[in-house]
């Protein structure tokens, strides 16, 4: 059985209610409206993310997934609406709180995962140098520790990003995202461009780190294998808002055309399993 089928087979066993809705929300988005000129990207968008879950955001290209993530990170401000992180609004908090949010969040961006002019070592050291007054020997220990966590050997630390494989770039970018021991990890298309084997090992890495570091993960992906292996819940972004949230099994029952097309393989597989 391949990974995808194995994951699908385990879906029934997976606690679809693993996320307790009474649990505290780590992120709460309400009434979000985003507009660029004539382009309305989000309209009355609502979304909650609960402590400890892996929530995956799916939607067609241009539906506003990365924009939403950037708003959660405080890098963009919507036209209307609120984005609360750790119980406080992103947009009316003071500098001290904004800085503490940054310390508690790690992000792996969709494009340009690493600074091309900095070595592997300096890429991972960057957030530590920016936010703390640590001496170089402490920074070195932390950088080497984070690189070991993502299985990057010491022999690669002085390499430049251009000399790394795609899989290694993602791992180093993940080490940098984890440098400050975040509680919240944002992953924008973490396995895009990786071959199936590298994707699978990246997914396993996230599964391990998630437990070790007690992370809450907000992930965007087009890759069904990655989605099925990692997600506790999925949120579907279509028609400028979140049309549904739930487990993979619950989502597949939704009649929205995007859902029916995006999850076609999963839905057909379930039909075949029910009518052998
Ligand atoms: N800074 C900006 N200025 C103007 N338009 C923008 C800006 N950022 C995003 N957009 C527009 O907002 C829409 C949503 O973009 P976004 O990058 O969030 O989509 P996405 O869902 O992440 O797509 P993809 O799956 O291709 O990554 C697009 O139409 C994009 O052109
Ligand atoms: Mg995007």
Image: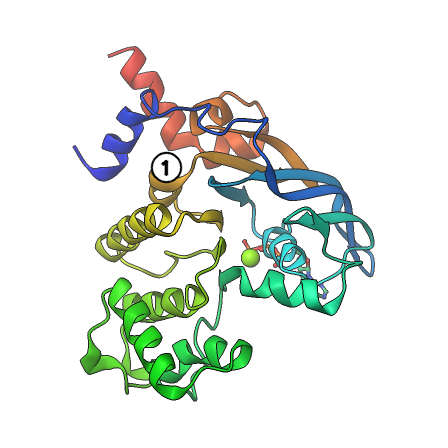
Q: Quadrant of ligand 1?
A: bottom right
Residue in the picture at 32% in, 46% down: 207
Q: In this rendering, is residue 227 above or below 169?
A: above
Q: Residue extending furthest left? A: 1
Q: Is mark 1 within 8 Å of ligand 1?
A: no
Q: Is residue 90 left or right of residue 192?
A: right
Image coordinates of residue 96 in percent, x first then y, are: 69, 67
In the rendered image, which quarter contains the C terminus? top left
Residue receiving disc 1: 228
236 or 108, which lies in front? 108
Q: SS class of the residue under badge 1? A: helix
Q: Label 1: few (<14), some or many (≥20) within 10 Å?
A: many
Q: Residue extending furthest top? A: 275
Q: Is residue 82 left or right of residue 222?
A: right
Residue in the picture at 19% in, 74% down: 153
Image coordinates of residue 235 in percent, x first then y, are: 56, 37
Where, by quadrant of the figure, is residue 26 drawn?
top right
Q: In this rendering, is residue 139 above or below 232?
A: below
Image coordinates of residue 210 in percent, x first then y, are: 37, 48
């Amino acid at each position: 059985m391949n990974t995808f089928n194995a994951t699908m087979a385990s879906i029934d066993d997976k606690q679809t209610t693993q996320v307790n809705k009474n649990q505290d929300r780590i992120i709460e988005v309400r009434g979000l409206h985003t507009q660029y000129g004539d382009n309305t990207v989000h309209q009355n968008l609502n979304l909650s993310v609960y402590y400890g879950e892996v929530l995956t955001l799916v939607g067609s290209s241009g539906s506003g997934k990365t924009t939403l993530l950037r708003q959660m990170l405080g890098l963009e401000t919507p036209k209307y609406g609120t984005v609360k992180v750790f119980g406080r609004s992103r947009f009316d908090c003071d500098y001290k709180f904004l800085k503490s949010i940054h310390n508690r969040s790690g992000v792996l961006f969709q494009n340009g995962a690493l600074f091309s002019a900095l070595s592997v070592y300096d890429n991972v050291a960057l957030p530590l140098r920016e936010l703390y007054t640590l001496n170089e020997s402490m920074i070195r220990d932390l950088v080497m520790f984070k690189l070991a966590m993502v299985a990057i050997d010491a022999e690669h630390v002085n390499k430049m990003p251009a000399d790394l494989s795609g899989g290694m770039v993602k791992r180093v970018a993940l080490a940098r995202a984890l440098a400050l021991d975040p509680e919240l990890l944002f992953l924008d298309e973490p396995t895009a461009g990786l071959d199936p084997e590298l994707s699978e090992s990246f997914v396993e890495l996230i599964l391990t780190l998630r437990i070790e570091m007690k992370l809450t993960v907000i992930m965007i992906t087009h890759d069904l294998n990655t989605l099925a292996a990692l997600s506790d819940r999925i949120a579907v972004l279509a028609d400028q808002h979140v049309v549904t949230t739930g487990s993979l099994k619950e989502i597949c029952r939704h009649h929205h055309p995007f859902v029916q097309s995006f999850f076609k393989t999963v839905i057909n597989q379930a039909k075949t399993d029910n009518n052998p």
